[in-house]
Amino acid sequence: MSKIALITGATSGIGEACAHLFAREGYNLVLTGRREDRLEKLAKKLNTKFNVEIAVSAFDVRDRQQVITSLEELPAKWRKVNVLINNAGLSQGLDPIDKGSYDDWDTMIDTNIKGLLYVSKIVANWMKEHKTGHIVNLGSIAGKEVYPNGNVYCATKSAVDTLGKAMRVDLVQHGIKVTTIDPGAVETEFSEVRFKGDKERAKKVYDGFDPLVAQDIAETIWFVVSRPAHVNINELTVMPTAQASATIIVRK
């Protein structure tokens, strides 16, 4: 069987772009996400275009039991995962700490930290059995720099960076690589989700400059994963040319 990549949050954005790229490179795929209809549509498209095998597993990474049940129900052949891309993540709201929503905080913490942990624990144990594997975690420039009203989102992405380091320490003895990718501004559904469907407000985030697109990050992930066996890239920060930091963007 060809190599296998398991991608969380594969229904859109960076996850979907990774699915296309890894399928093009001959990987069989386990695609996960909350929107089963999108997963099925994507799986059919990639199978037709690239003739790769694809398993679809619809679940919400926030729900521990859903994660465990869905992944453990996969047939044995799909547990030989070579690459795990922990892409599922989001931001909710943009409020100062004293006005933040408890529900928004829970959603970000449960998705960005706990969801990543739930999936990683299961897949890391599969990788240990074969003494090889590569875990790629999607962080953010927000995990490197705190910006106004970013508070809890920044904290969750800082946790992703820290967990990446911890995973590397704990799993290196098992031949498992761990990489964290920290993008700057990427134009996906991210801002629309952050602003809860307000497309006009989301669009303004990317006005006046050329942001990264999902394909840019997918190609970066492929570069990292395709290095020789003795090479691991621990962390990469990827920014649009117009963005110097989390808060400094040159707009036309």
Image: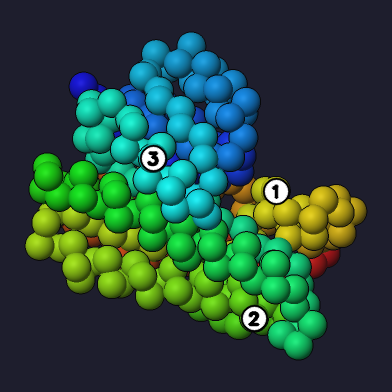
Q: Is residue 18 above or below residue 172?
A: above
Label 3 belongs to which residue? Answer: 69
Q: Amino acid at mark 1?
A: Glu
Identity, as a three-letter code, of the amino acid under mark 3 = Thr
Q: Is residue 229 visible?
A: no
Q: CA distance from mark 3 to mark 2?
A: 33 Å
Q: With 231 as the anchor, is 201 left or right in this view?
A: right
Task: State the scheme by which the image is colored.
Answer: rainbow
Instruction: Give the number of the mark in front: 3 or 1.
Output: 3
Residue at the bottom extreme?
A: 98
Q: Which residue appears at 87% of the width and 59% of the height?
A: 201
SS at badge 3: helix
Nearest to the eye among marks 1 and 2: give it.
Answer: 2
Q: Earlier in the sequence, mark 3 or mark 1?
A: 3
Q: Which residue is disc 1 drawn over?
A: 189
108 sits left or right of 93 in the view: left
Any part of residue 131 in sight = yes
Q: In the rendered image, which residue does mark 2 sit on?
A: 151
